[in-house]
Each structure stands twice: as C-alpha cells, then as structure tokens.
Amino acid sequence: MKQSALLGRTSGLRPAQTRRLERISHRRHPEGHGFDWLSLQRLAAESAELALPLSLVVDGRGLCRLLWVGPLEHSGQLMHRLPGGVRRLGGELRLVTCAGKPKQLAPQASEAVVGLDLQPQLWLRYANTAEPGGHWPAAAYITSRDPAEPWQCLESGDLAELCELEPPEQVAAPAAKRTPGKEQVMLLVLSPSDPEAARREVAELEGLVRSAGAEPVGLVTQRQSHNAAHPLWGEGKVREAALEARRLGASLVVTDRELTPAQARNLERVLDLPVSDRSELILDIFAQRANSGAGRLQVELAQLRYRLPRLVGRGLSLSRQGGGIGTRGPGETQLEKDRRAIARRIDKLQRDVQKLREHRARLRSNRHGQSRMALVGYTNAGKSSLLNALSRAQGSEAVLAENKLFATLDPTTRRIRQANPEGGPPQTLLLTDTVGFIRDLPPPLVEAFRSTLEEALDADQLLLVVDLSDPGWENQLQTVHRILDELGSEAPRQLVANQIDRCPASALEQVRSLDGEAAFVSATSGLGLERLKQVLFDTGARQTPA
C-alpha cells in the first residue's frame, strides 16, 4: 500500500512536476514534531512555479501521508483521503501549508473547517518566497478555545526556527460531550424577530431531534430577513456553522425549515456535513414510530414522495435500453432508472393506501348510529393519556403515552361507557385518538396520512386538546384550527384544557376568556375527567338520532 498520496489539482501537471512532488511527499520529517527544512524549501519552489498553495499531512512517525495540490477548501475531509485510513496513522498529525503571499498566512474560513476536521497538533503556514535577507515568513497555528477564532497563532517568525517548534500540550479545545449511541446534531435556525417565538421554535426543534433519537449539541441562529426574496442563511453564517459543528463534534446539521434540493446541496457543500431539514426529521420520527402495517405503508409513501425530487447521482453508470439500429447510445443513467423505480413504487403504495382508505370507510360505516368523537391537537398535548384515563385502559390495552413528540401514529378507538341514569344498558360512545399535529406539517405527510386523518374528519365532534403547561399553547391551538380548516373539517369542536394541575392560574383565565365552554382536566391526576365524560355523553345524546 502506498505511503503517501498526491491529490488535488493534479490533472494539469507535467510529468516532471508530478515526479518532483512525489519525491517531496516521500521525504521523511522529524519524528514526534517539527518539519524538514529542505523539504519545505522544495515545496515552496513548486508552489511558486504552479502558483498554487501546497499542503502536506505528516504523521507522528514523520511520514508524509498526503500532498494536496491547490486550496484546502476544495479537499473535503482530509482524514478520509489518507492512504490506509485512520488505522495506519502513527501518532498525532501535523499539517503544513505553503500558502503563497505573506498576507495569506492566516487560515481562511473554508480552510479552517478542513483543518478542524483533521485536528493536527500544529499547523505550519509559510510563504512560497523568501524576503530580502533570506527571512522566510511563517506562522504556526493551534486550535483555539474561542468559537469565533478556531485557530490561534502560537508563534510567527522565520520558517527555519518554526520548523523546530514543539507544540505545547493540551492546546486543543475540549472535546464535546457525547452520548453513547446517539448522533450529535447541530441546529441551524432562522429565528423570527419575536424572541419568545424564536425560543419556542428552537425548543420544538430540539424536541424533534430528541424524539428522533439524536442529541442536539449546538445552535447557530440568524435573524430572519423579511425583505429577502429567498430568506436563507448568509454564506458567512453558514461558514460559522461549519466551524461550530467541528468544534462540537457534530455529525449532522438540522435546519428549522424545509429546503429545496438545490438549497440542501449548497449547504452540504459549504458545511461538508450531511444536512436534514425539519420535514425530513419529522418523516424519520414517523418511520421509527410506525408499528402497524398501515402506518409503515403511509410513512414509506410520504418518504418516497419527499425524496424523489431530491434524488441525486453521478450519472456515470449507463445502460442500453436495447440493441439494434436506433437504440445505440448512452441509454439511461442509473439515476433515471432509480427515479422510474421509485415512481413505480409510489404508484403501488398509492393503490394500497386507497384500499386502506376504503377499508377504514367500511369500518366507520359499521359504527353508524353510535356517537363518535375524536381527540385532536398538537403533538405531545396529552391526547393518548386522556384516552387511557377516560377508557380506564390498563396494561396491553392502554395506548402508548410518552413525553415525546409523535409517540403514537395509528388511530386507536376505545369504547367509553357510563351508567344510564334512567336505568337499562349503559351509555356508550366511541372515542378515537389520532396522530398529533405540528407547525408546518410536511405536505407529503399530510397527503399520505389522509386516510388516518379521515378518522378525525368523519367524527361527530372533535375534542381539541391543549397542554396548558406549555407556554406556547395558544399558538399550538391556532395551528390545530388552521390544519383542520385546510383539511375541510366541519365537525363541532370542543376545547379541552389539559394539565390544569401544572399550569399557571393566568392560563386558566386565558382559556375562559377564549372559550367559555372549555373543559378543564388533568389526564395524569384525574381532575375533571368525570365532568368531561358527562359533557361528552350529553353532547353525544343530542347528536345521535333516536
């Protein structure tokens, strides 16, 4: 296996230049620390002739593992380009860059990101020509604890002296705390001008990340501009996010809004990290929560609809469609075949979802003559807990109720019974728990789960559950009303204020002023449940035909 690799802008090099660069990459440097002065002089001569920066990656044994031709900002993650990978590294890495002019010695934003990926113990940067008198401008950099300045100058002076410089111990910024088995995620947010609204949106995004099984480790925000035609993050802010992600050890960046395919690719190019938007994050949560066949079917359909326009490929794998005159040529690319295969899968899933919709419609028709009510509301408002409390379900019969966003997906119907005050058989009604709503619900998800949402649309009455312990309950209630209006729901709506034992008194007064007929309950402590049940049966008796 080769000791060193020559990569970068090598396609235009003459054979003699390539041989000289390869000889430089095979020269050995001092073991432990420092650089070979003669090798760096030869590297500077080649940099001046090519008018390009040149960089060397040297391991702890003094072996040059990589010579990169051109700016480092185009190199991607250097660690993945080393021959043999990480397992062949001999101790701490050192990085040296012949940067060109003396004014270009400080690492630029894109180069700083590449350096943080490599995490060298020392980064030596110097000019490709000596000044009069033989002085060769150079500067040595180490990682900084300041997020705004990821690289700090340890010492500057003549190259010959810095070649012998020994880096101090414990110079790197402290490593980010990692939770074993969890992906580290950095949040990239466009915050509104209202600080309270911005705080709620960030908290909701953090909740989504944790619900997906990852750990949010950092946050980069930018004030949203209402004047921009396409309000997104500026290039400087994205580069700041790239540096922050390296400092925190993040392996994924999640944005708080949906991205177009082009926007996602541009962000990934600058960040040099995978990027997921809020819609993709919600789809991932749904995929984890889908336990039934119907749920998995609808989630797969939503994911394919989301990913089809975002499918990318190199287009290098070509196949002929057939043989003979008129069919010779490049044929279709692998990307086009993948798109057609996904389109066929979407068609099949749409037919299956239509069958599911018809099946659920037949089930609802069998319940004709019974009072049917549905619990709707923002995700994690306590709908499942309220259903368990009203139906007194325990053990395996209880619906999963966790303090997570989108803990349950599939609609669950329970029969609620109450003794008949006039004697005779007990009164009954059907109560259905539905999937929770959220702000800016992805359109592919709404369309795929329309058959599930029809359980709520076809109910005789909707119980709008709000969590009064959440400071943003008013905005969540507005979101639920807006989604129901967009779905064409015409059923009467009954406001149910949950968590009254954990909310401030001012929230109770706000609810009373908003809706004088609102019901106040606590699903966990049982407060107000009997009164709510009586209201439901009284309403059901009025709505059910005799």
Image (cartoon, rainbow, N blue to C red):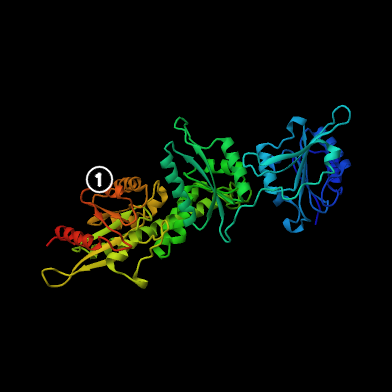
* Mark 1 secondary-structure assignment: helix
Q: Tell me where residue 41 sits by quadrant.
A: top right
Q: At x 25% / y 45%, what residue is drawn?
A: 514
Relative to 395, 60 lies left or right: right
How many marks the image carries: the answer is 1
Q: Is residue 227 left or right of residue 377?
A: right
x and y percent of residue 300 in the render?
A: 45, 57
Q: Farthest residue toward the front?
A: 505
Q: Quadrant of residue 234?
A: top right
Looking at this view, is 477 or 520 the one in front? 520
Q: Quadrant of the N terminus?
A: bottom right
The residue sitting at 29% across, 69% down in the picture is 392
Residue 398 visible? The answer is yes
Can you name the residue that lies furthest to the top here? 132
Q: Nearer the viewer, residue 201 or 301?
A: 201
Percent x, y of residue 85: 73, 55
* Residue drawn where x is 30% and y is 50% of the image: 505
Residue 101 seen from this side: no
Residue depicted at x 53% and y 48%: 311
Label 1, residues with CA under 10 Å away: few <14, some 14-19, many ≥20:
few
Q: Is residue 151 above or below residue 209?
A: above
Residue 380 appears left or right of 144 = left
Q: Inspect the image, locate mark 1, and give the three-letter code of the amino acid beneath it.
A: Leu
Q: Position of residue 136 (x, y in %)?
A: 84, 33
Question: Which residue bears the numbered disc 1?
Answer: 514
